[in-house]
Image (cartoon, helix red, strand yellow):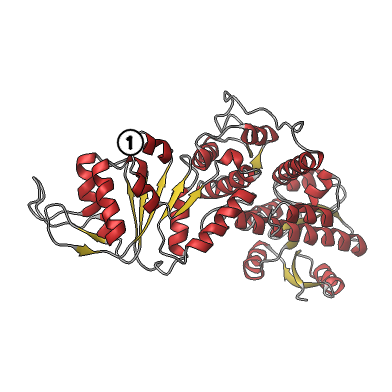
Amino acid sequence: MKKQKLLIVDDDEDLRTQMKWALAQDYEIVLAEDRPSAMAAMKKAQPAVITLDLGLPPVPAGVEEGFATLDEIMAENSQTKVIIITGRGEKENALRAIGKGAYDFFYKPIQLDELKVVLGRAFYVSQLEHEQRMLQKRLSGDTFEGMLGTCPKIQDIYAIIRKVSGTDAPVLIMGESGTGKELVARAMHRLSVRQAKPFIVINCGAIPENLLESELFGHEKGAFTGAHVQRKGRIEMAEGGTLFLDEIGELPMLLQVKLLRFLQEHTIERVGGREQIDVDARVVAATNRDLKEAMRGGTFREDLYFRLGVILMSLPPLREREGDVILLAKAFLERYAGENRKKIKGFTDQALDSIMQYAWQGNVRELENRVKRAVIMAEGAKILPADLDMEEVAPLPKPKYENMGLKEARECLEKEMLLKSLARNKDNLTKAATDLGVSRPTLYDMMEKFGIPKE
């Protein structure tokens, strides 16, 4: 196994040599005698742990050069574990160093057996934090084609996406506003044989009715006032790729007839034209309306509904995605804290409670917007309910277990406590296990049971 790297920074050559020989069996040792050599060695070797003597040249009798070195180390990589070497009469310096980000301090004269214990703990904590960062990276990245979630309902959606991506069958995605309907459509496109071709989006509810026909089907030069040139419509632009019709329930009846003809014959006519144009495009539509109610009311064609809905997908609202709200909130926090260069460590317990109890009528989009706002507004190291603008919200009632069976209630409470503990401890698995009073293997088993990624 490759040895972990340890950087020893000390102006005493004899002491550096003694420490190197004493620790070389366990670690790959890198040596430095002053601030410039220490920073050069750190950038080249990228050690996880550093021992730092505060008394460095050009003023070895003082401590300010050591503190300046510590500041540079933390600025270069705040995850580095720095162990300060200090005299027994300098406890105030040790505490000052801890306040600046040092991991621990060690008194002179150095007792190697004790130092080995401190080093072992520092490397162990560094490894745990590395695991945590990998988990956070996974949570804030593309868990599945840009979507994040571990609850059974969203996993079922992933399974459907995998199955239908290999076909050209029309898909109708239903779900409340903000549930991620366009993300699902894009995922199907990226996983299909059409991935190299265009993905064309049109929001049927955002374009005035008198312009929508031209937007969809295009127009010929002179077809109407202002039509100075021939123009392709969105359907034609999607040739070979995927056409995503968002808010299909807002499509006027006249255009519903023309869209139905395209779905049946795969041909269109531009406005003002007579030429039949063949178009090979897969159609994915989405709506937040109840189309069956619209059909009963005579505002949506039944034949178009069944033509579009060869495959129906119903996206669950966020309030029904048990446990996902915390995973998503953490992912958004990681993303926007990085974008805004703010060192925010997480959410307070009160903020987590507010997030878990809130109704989320705007679903994932609302959650993302609130976390983005919170990152901008936050003044402390953790997000408060006020940062989320959730002080005045009417929260949902706490989970009720009395209508559940004992097994279901126990699992519901167990998952809730696990997610809260992971969030509270910033995904540090050792701390979470201690917090819950279980062993790490038991914690792993719990995370596997509820589909929570460990790395």
> Mark 1 Cα within 10 Å, few/some/many (few <14, many 20+)?
few
Residue located at (84% from left, 69% from top): 19
Name the spot of residue 324 as percent of width and height, x first: 62, 45
Task: Give the residue at x 60% y 32%.
Answer: 358
Q: Quadrant of the C terminus?
A: bottom right
Q: Quadrant for residue 411, please give it.
A: top right
Q: Is residue 233 above or below residue 401?
A: below
Is residue 31 rendered to the left or right of residue 283? right
* In this view, 173 is above or below 118: above
Q: Is residue 273 among what the camera can see?
A: yes
Give x and y (percent) for residue 147. Answer: 53, 53
Nearer to us in this view, 208 or 402? 402
Left or right: residue 308 versus residue 405 is: left
The amino acid marked with disc number 1 is: Gly
**What residue do we see at 79% from left, 48% from top?**
431
Q: Residue at x 62, y 66 (%)?
A: 43
- Front-most of residues 341 and 296: 296
Q: Position of residue 225 (x, y in %)?
A: 8, 45
Residue 242: image location, x then y, percent: 36, 60
Residue named by callout 1: 298
Query: Quadrant location of the N terminus?
Result: bottom right
> Would residue 112 appear left or right of 98 to someone viewing this image?
right
Give whichever of 208, 116 is nearer the camera: 208
Is residue 112 left or right of 368 when viewed as pictured? right
Q: Secondary structure at mark 1?
A: loop
Look at the picture and state if 196 lies above or below 420.
Answer: below
Decide if residue 54 is in sight here.
no
